[in-house]
Image (cartoon, rainbow, N blue to C red):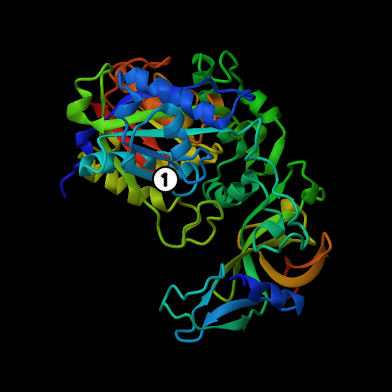
Amino acid sequence: MKNLLNQTAIAGIGQTEFSKFSGRSELQLALEASKAALDDAGLKPSDIDGTVTFTIDPNDELALMTNLGIHELRWTARTIGGGGGASATVQLAAAAVASGAANTVLVYRAFNERSGQRFGQPIGGYAGGVPGKDIHFSFGLDTPAKIYALWYQPYMAKYGVTNEDLADYVVTARQHAATNPRAWFYEKPITVEDHQKSRWIVEPVLRLLDCCQESDGGVALIVTSAERARDLRQRGVRVLAAAQSHTRNSDIMFNYYHEDLTVFDELPTISAQLWNQSGLGPKDIDVAMIYENFSPIVLMALEGHGFCGPGEAKDFIREGHIGLKGSLPVNTHGGLLGEGYIHGVNNLLEGVRQIRGTAANQIADAETVLVSASRSAVILGNL
Amino acid sequence: MRDQDLFWSGVDEGKLLFQKCRDCGTVRNPPGPMCPNCQSLNAAPHESNGRGTVCAWIISKHPTRPDENHRIVALIEMEDGVRMVSNLREIDFADVTPGLPVELFFAEVGGAMLPQFRPSASV
């Protein structure tokens, strides 16, 4: 099948600071990030005719367009689920542009996820029967840490991955954050010992430092045709591939019902789409951003995308492959646990910066960047 | 009306009930209105024998009100051919192993009756 998505490009990126207390409304964060992305691309609000965000984003499209000064929206779309849909935003925007449904699509994600409603706090009232009994919540699965840990535990048990093995990823990501001025944990690297001294959140899977941050902030990016992107202010970044995969018996959070619990079911299927669209394979990827709500997902994703074999990720990481000087630098901005948690859309911005050559931790000659949220992913490259 | 009402009505009677398709006989969990195997909307209650094995388990140390007692949360592979989330009791966390045979009992947790599991007596 002909790939039309690769006739599109990311022409601009913008963001606010990532903090624990933004002191302003979520809509303002979305607007500030959107305006920054427009300025980056050298575009005006009236050039935007489409938007994409998350289903659960608090910012209404019409409120955003009115405040920003967009004249007419011809395309709006929202991705399913949560962070798994982070890279699907680009697929939806690229599909709109490739089809002609819109010319220039603004992708935005903004929230006060630390100073406002925190994702990591328990959903109360389910331990007993009030306010309602539930087949998951009632048994104590009332935070994302617990919900996802029960899913990750069989993988770790099968391959003998210990919590200390996870520390190797976390230490690497925090090293990357330490030299990224945008990162919340800028200049705050940690050691394996620091990781192992952090308190258990969910035994035997997650300590505190395995968990992503809760952050306030906004990010935005602009997708348009590759042809148009050539004439804009920034060097455009081509969408080489963009895919989603959601397979039967899958669940965004309570993912306990697909056949083999020791694999992330969607990774082989989404990888097949990515390689098919782009003509590339795992060895052709220069840099990877991997959505990590919690550290174990990085190991499952490295294996599921084919960067190493089943059960090999812990050694792949220990051997230094994902560091800045490794064969596959991963989460060069520090990841969601090091830079900030803007639901994984900040990973897309880092992917763009790596292709442009403007990242804080720039990888020399980065020509192909995978930005994976496991259920959605894109490969970015040169225009 | 919720799709999981059958499950909880069973709990009220001290039974573990799953949905079983009246047309093709497939037992399913989590609950849902349609049989994913044959698309039938006709389901009957299927009472489980309460036997299964442990396929995943965690213990929460997050300092939250509902989990002050650090419940073991487990995913149980039931003999009925479905999985369900529940709690493991009457065993130390360190002693749980993959494939551990477990059996159902009912207990009050936080003021509500819940299906719970413990190591099988008859192994």
Dot 1 alpha-carbon crowd within 10 angstroms: few under 14, some 14 to 19, many 20 or more: some
In the rendered image, the quadrant that contains the C terminus of chain A is top left
Please report, as a chain letter, where disc 1 is located. Answer: A
Relative to the observer, which residue lies in front, A261 or A12? A12
- What residue is shown at x 56% (from left), y 70% (from top)? B31
Three-letter residue code for mark 1:
Arg
- Can you give x and y, in whole percent of width and height, for residue A68 in the image? 42, 27
Relative to the observer, which residue lies in front, A21 or B103? A21
Relative to A20, say whether A49 is above or below: below
Q: Secondary structure at mark 1?
A: strand
- Can you give x and y, in whole percent of width and height, for residue B33 in the image? 51, 74
Q: Quadrant of residue B115?
A: bottom right
Q: Is residue B69 left or right of residue B117?
A: right
What residue is disc 1 on?
A: A78
- Can you give x and y, in whole percent of width and height, for residue A77 in the image? 38, 45
- What residue is shown at x 55% (from left), y 25% (from top)? A338
Relative to the observer, which residue lies in front, A196 or B110? B110
Relative to B28, say whether A180 is above or below: above
Relative to A338, say whether B5 is above or below: below
Does the image show residue A316? no
- What residue is shown at x 62% (from left), y 66% (from top)? B53
Q: Quadrant of residue A279?
A: top left
Relative to A198, say whether A325 is above or below: above
- What residue is shown at x 44% (from left), y 32% (from top)? A66
Does the image show residue A216? yes
